Image (spheres, rainbow, N blue to C red):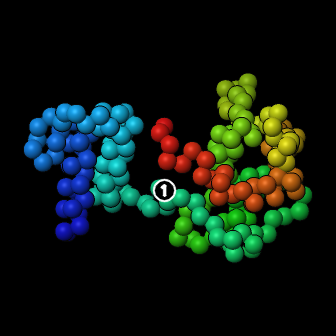
Amino acid sequence: MQEREKIRKAKEVLLKIAHGTNPITGNEMDGEEFLNDPRIIRCFYFVADILQNVLDGRYSSKKYAPFVITPEQKSRVKLPEGKIGVNAFSKCVNEVLDMTGKQLTGTELNKKLKKMNILSETVNSEGKSATTINENSYKFGFELEHRSYNNREYDMVVMNDMGKKYLLDNLETIMGVGAGSEG
C-alpha cells in the first residue's frame, strides 16, 4: 500500500507541474522556461497517465519496454529459404526472444521501415491503407509480389535474402527509430 501512495503522490506532483503550479507552495510558477515547453508538458501528462495505469492495474511493462535482442539470440534466428513477409520474419525472431521482453510484430516493423522511407503506405480503391514499396525498397531487399488467397488477389511486400540480412543485422537500430520522440 505504501508504494501505491508514493505513485499517487508522484502523479499529483507531475500534474501540478504540468498545470504550471509549484507542487510545494501551490503558487503559479514563474521564470521556469522549460516548463512552458509543450514537449515537457506532454511528457508530464504521459508519465502521469502511466502512473494512473499502474494504480489501476492496467500497466504492462512490455508495452513501454524497448525492443531488445542479444547477439546470442540473433545468432539463433533461423529464417526460411526464399522470400518472406515481415510477419514471418517477426515470428522467427520471436522464437528466440525471452518471453518476458517485448515481442516483435510485423505491424511495428512496417511502421519503423516506413519512418525510414524504406517502405511506404498506399490507399486502395476501398479506402484501406496498405504497406507497399517505394524507390528505396529494392536497395534494402524489399519487393512486391503478387499473391492469391481464397480467390482474392493482392500484392504483398516481401524481402529477399538481402532484405532478411539487412533486417536481422540492423534490427535494434530499426526498432529504435522514433522511440522516445514526441508524437
The front one of 159 and 37 is: 37
Question: Where's the N terminus, which quadrant?
Answer: bottom left
Q: Where does residue 61 sit, x and y in percent of width and height?
A: 44, 62
How many numbered discs, if any? 1
User: In the visual, does 70 lie left or right of 17?
Assistant: right
User: In the visual, does 170 lie left or right of 158?
Assistant: left
Residue 93 in view (yes/no): yes
User: In the visual, does 121 lie left or right of 179?
Assistant: right
Please tell me which residue is depicted at 19% across the width and 68% down the height of the picture.
2
Q: Amino acid at mark 1?
A: Lys
Question: Which quadrant would residue 99 be assigned to in this image?
Answer: bottom right
Residue underneath mark 1? 63
Please tell me which residue is depicted at 82% across the width and 46% down the height of the picture.
140
Outermost residue toward the right? 82
Asked if residue 94 is positioned above or below residue 18 in the image, the reply reads below
Please tell me which residue is depicted at 67% across the width and 33% down the height of the picture.
129
Outermost residue toward the top? 125
The front one of 38 and 68 is: 38
